[in-house]
Image (cartoon, grey):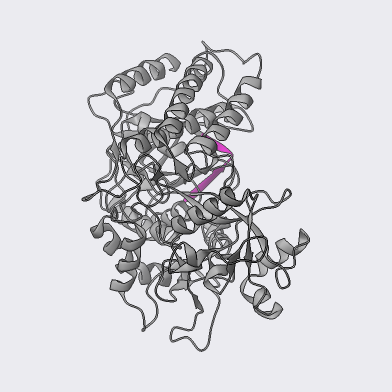
């Protein structure tokens, strides 16, 4: 058994920032499914939104966030995040993050503008902001003597009081599969942080890395936490469409710097859908592209930035320029083929302004969490800001708590399970799930499609439950189990919203209702009882 003061599950921006903020005072363990930099944060291109210019204002950033969120943002959480934005950026600069400079700017850094923003307020490191931030913070994490990094560890389930038969439902750590050795490790902690990211891999087409299987959301649900707004899955409008370009994102900033969306014949179409044209929020642009593709029978549309000079493109979008050129697309001379793809999970585990969940000593920070910031649609470049602000809030809350020693925890017992005789069922189920979620629970939805998806999810859950109960756990089984749970939560949330709002568009309910409320799901008592029995059976 391993033991830490605080255990952080996930090595994205939220996880790394939190580890650094705690490590001078605590023994910190950080586990990650693959390598330290193998996650969605490292792929973030555009930047981080914050009020940094004298011509901008907190109220303007709050207004833009609330507008994009389509009436479902929590205004207290939104103001809290925006007000702490500059401090979060100052902290990153102090850590040594090499943001792109601009001597003409009143703060010395270049600020770009993205869809939904009324000002230039996106600080960035060229078009690879996430990598620059993650590389800088990872170096800090790896050099700190109080931080233990465990790569290739896949969390199985949280260890809670209710699952152990204790009178409280505190979290005491996690069981994790050491993937190279296929051994399950018991990890005890006074505080456990879910920083596991979103669930984009539940869809066939996504900008997310393979690690985005909704593990934290599924584990928190099984542990008794509420989840909220899972119907709001953001589809990024512009993922590169090319047979050899898996999940490569064309940054929002390309449109912010003048990129125009066109049909194959060169016709511009966004002004017909929204007066903000290419600078409309992501949900508007994604639906417009989806509409034009279906109307004209297209495989993709085109994003044209060729009016900018080669020098401008190489300076502002070096990663995109180089990647496209390697695929035979010269973006200085021809448009970029693009399609929408699942990009961001706006809902998640219900967490307060300190990152605290419904389970004591369990926190959720970043994309895994529902903080109330994003509402029905996340404003571009608010995600990394959310990671930073709530990592700081959670760190301060943890450091202010009295010391608590976890009870003795039982080891994982696999004496009553065997090796699976075949893995083909897992791979087939994985493919089926991602296909029908794309077809039935995508950008435009109907009750009939959602009900079809719900029926198939139930069949998959029955098969997965049989596997999980009788065979040794494997990474593919664990991730499929979590993805199917996320799919169920997405569909259940979508069926319960009888309107169209933000990222959720229903043909059966095309209008917006007055006085909208977030969709909050609570774990069913019967399901919790079954999970408790299944968990005990494995101990």
Q: Is residue 227 magenta?
A: no
Res 73 quadrant in image: bottom left
Which residue is most to the top? 416
Which of these two is toward me, 524 or 421? 524
Q: Position of residue 89 (x, y in %)?
A: 42, 70
**Which residue corresponds to the image point at 39% horizontal and 17% vertical from the top-left?**
536
Image side of residue 528 versus residue 415, left or right: left
Residue at 62% x, 20% y: name it.
425
Residue 483 lies left or right of residue 181; in this view the side is: left
Front residue of 415/43: it is 43
The residue that appears at 46% across and 44% down in the rendered structure is 444
Q: Point out the stretch of residues depicted in magenta.
A: 146-154
How many numbered discs, if any? 0
Image quarter for residue 127? bottom right
Judge from the rendering whether residue 58 lies leftward or rightward of residue 289; answer left or right: left
Q: Place residue 118 in its image quadrant.
A: bottom left
- Residue 50 place in picture, x, y as percent: 39, 70
| Visible residue check, residue 203 | yes
Q: Main secondary structure of the magenta part?
A: strand
């Amino acid at each position: 058994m391993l033991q830490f003061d605080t255990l952080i599950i996930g090595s994205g921006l939220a996880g790394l920032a939190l580890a650094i903020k705690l490590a001078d005072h605590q023994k910190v363990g950080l586990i990650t499914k693959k390598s330290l930099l193998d996650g969605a944060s490292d792929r973030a291109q555009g930047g981080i939104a914050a009020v940094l210019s004298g011509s901008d204002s907190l109220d303007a950033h709050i207004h833009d966030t609330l507008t994009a969120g389509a009436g479902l943002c929590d205004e207290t959480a939104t103001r809290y995040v925006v007000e702490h934005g500059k401090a979060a950026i100052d902290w990153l600069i102090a850590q040594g993050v090499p943001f792109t400079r601009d001597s003409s700017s009143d703060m010395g850094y270049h600020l770009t503008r993205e869809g939904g923003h009324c000002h230039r307020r996106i600080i960035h490191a060229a078009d690879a902001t996430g990598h620059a931030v993650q590389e800088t913070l990872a170096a800090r994490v790896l050099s700190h003597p109080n931080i233990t990094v465990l790569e290739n560890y896949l969390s199985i389930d949280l260890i809670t009081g209710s699952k152990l038969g204790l009178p409280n439902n505190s979290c005491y750590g996690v069981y994790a599969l050491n993937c190279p050795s296929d051994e399950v490790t018991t990890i005890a902690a006074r505080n456990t942080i879910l920083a596991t990211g979103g669930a984009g891999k539940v869809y066939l087409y996504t900008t997310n890395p393979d690690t985005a299987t909704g593990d934290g959301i599924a584990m928190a649900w099984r542990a008794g936490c509420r989840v909220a707004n899972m119907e709001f899955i953001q589809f990024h409008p512009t993922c590169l469409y090319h047979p050899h370009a898996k999940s490569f994102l064309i940054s929002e900033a390309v449109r912010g710097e003048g990129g125009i969306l066109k049909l194959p014949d060169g016709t511009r179409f966004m002004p017909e859908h929204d007066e903000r044209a290419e600078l409309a929020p992501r949900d508007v642009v994604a639906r417009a592209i989806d509409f034009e593709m279906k109307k004209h029978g297209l495989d993709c549309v085109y994003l044209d930035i060729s009016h900018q000079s080669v020098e401008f493109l190489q300076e502002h979008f070096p990663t995109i320029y180089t990647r496209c050129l390697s695929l035979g697309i010269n973006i200085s001379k021809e448009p970029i083929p693009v399609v929408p793809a699942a990009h961001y999970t706006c809902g998640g585990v219900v967490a307060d302004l300190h990152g605290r969940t419904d389970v004591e000593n369990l926190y959720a920070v970043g994309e895994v969490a529902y903080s109330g910031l994003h509402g029905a649609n996340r404003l571009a470049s608010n995600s990394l800001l959310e990671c930073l602000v709530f990592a700081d809030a959670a760190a301060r809350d943890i450091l202010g708590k009295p010391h608590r020693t976890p009870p003795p925890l039982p080891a994982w017992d696999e004496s009553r399970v065997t090796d699976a005789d075949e893995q083909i069922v897992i791979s087939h189920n994985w493919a089926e799930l991602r296909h029908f979620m794309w077809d039935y629970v995508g950008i435009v939805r109907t009750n009939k499609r959602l009900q079809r998806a719900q029926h198939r999810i139930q069949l998959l859950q029955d098969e997965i439950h049989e596997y999980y109960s009788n065979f040794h756990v494997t990474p593919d089984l664990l991730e499929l189990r979590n993805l199917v749970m996320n799919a169920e939560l997405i569909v259940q949330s979508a069926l319960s919203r009888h309107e169209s709002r933000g990222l959720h568009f229903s043909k059966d309910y095309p209008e917006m209702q007055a006085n909208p409320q977030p969709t909050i799901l609570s774990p069913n008592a019967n399901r919790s009882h079954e999970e408790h029995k299944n968990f005990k059976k494995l101990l």
